[in-house]
Image (cartoon, rainbow, N blue to C red):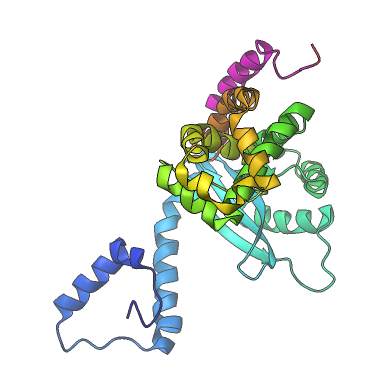
Amino acid sequence: MFFECNLSFNLARHDAFLKFVSAVGEAGPSFKAPSSETLRTKELRAEVMEVEKELQPMKASWERYGCTILSDGWSDARRRPLINILVSSCQGTVFLKAIDASGAGVSHTGEYIFRHIKNAIEEVGPKNVVQVVTDNAANCVLAGKMIETDYPSISWVPCASHSINLLIEDIGKLEWVARIVHLGSKMISFLTRKHSALSIYRKYATHEILKPSKTRFAYLFIVLQRLVKVRPCLRRMIVSEEWIAWPNSTSPKAINFEATISDASFWHDAECIVGVLRPLIVALRLTDSEGCTMGILYEFMEKVGEAFDSNTWLDRTR
């Protein structure tokens, strides 16, 4: 089944698979598997009802403690834009609905986002909603203002994770920081595009080179942190016999690759950037955790601000 259906081997570790095998074994040889029609109708409806039953205590807590409406733009496997709407409270987070925003002629204006969030507020109950959280895009900001106009008791709050990521991106726009990130990205691109060079690196590596998408949160931190960690491996690589014997080691790109690895100022600046961004990454992880973290986040960001005030190295013009 795993081979013919091309299933991930990690499925064999999943609790659901182990329970399934155990249940089939207890049922014995007379057990008959349900048909696909039964699975997608009767069994699916039964499972939905079971999940709804389990969620009732959490939904009941919305009236007692209040809750937050979360709106997040996303894309499915076919690159179709979606708007996910979730409800979060001190009891946990519930997925409410997903809006397919890929229709012909659909414009993701503030009014469009507001309309769907308003429907979610009415479904949950306006008196139960304390705040609405979206990212900081202009259309979301407009939708937030419209929500506060229609519902004076509900506040619009920009997403903390998105705000921190924008702060990291602003640091990355500093001229000297951008230069270091560019050099680091060129090193990674050289290694990942030259299979022979990557093979040599792996002989001396303790960690793989990471090449995250530029759209990922904290991209520049991920790139530079891993490069700083594997610096000794890169140094051993460029002085190895395999590298010297590699025909392309004398190409202009390979020479620039060696020069960057041997540049002490590059590594000093990379370590500085990683050091100052680390508190922001901790805050980013904090905002992504379950539970009520707002109070902890406020206190932590104050400490981050104090740390920034005590570091003048970000401004190389001083």
| Residue at 44% from the left image edge and 48% from the top image edge | 202
Kindly identify the residue that appears in the image at 54 percent across and 57 percent down. Answer: 195
Residue 246 vertical placement versus 166 (above, below):
below
Q: Report which quarter residue 47 is drawn in.
A: bottom left
Task: Give me the residue at 63% from left, 55% from top.
Answer: 85
Residue 302: say if magenta: yes
Rendered location of residue 297, percent (x, y): 57, 27
Apparent side of residue 66 relative to residue 55 in the rendered image (left or right): right
The front one of 233 and 196 is: 196
Image quadrant holding the C terminus, namely: top right
Residue 18 higher or lower than 158, as above or below: below
| Residue 203 in view (yes/no) | yes
Q: Quadrant of the N terminus?
A: bottom left
Q: Quadrant of residue 83?
A: bottom right
Residue 52 pos. (x, y %): 45, 63
Q: Position of residue 135 (x, y in %)?
A: 71, 44
Residue 122 located within the stretch drawn in magenta: no
> What residue span does the magenta drawing correspond to?
295-316
How many numbered circles are shown? 0
Q: Is residue 167 left or right of residue 284?
A: right
Q: Quadrant of residue 78?
A: bottom right
Direction from residue 285 to residue 84 in the image, left or right: right
Visible residue check, residue 91: no
Task: Name the residue nearer the viewer: 239 or 18.
Answer: 239
Main secondary structure along the magenta-highlighted residues: helix
Residue at screen point 68% across, 12% down: 309
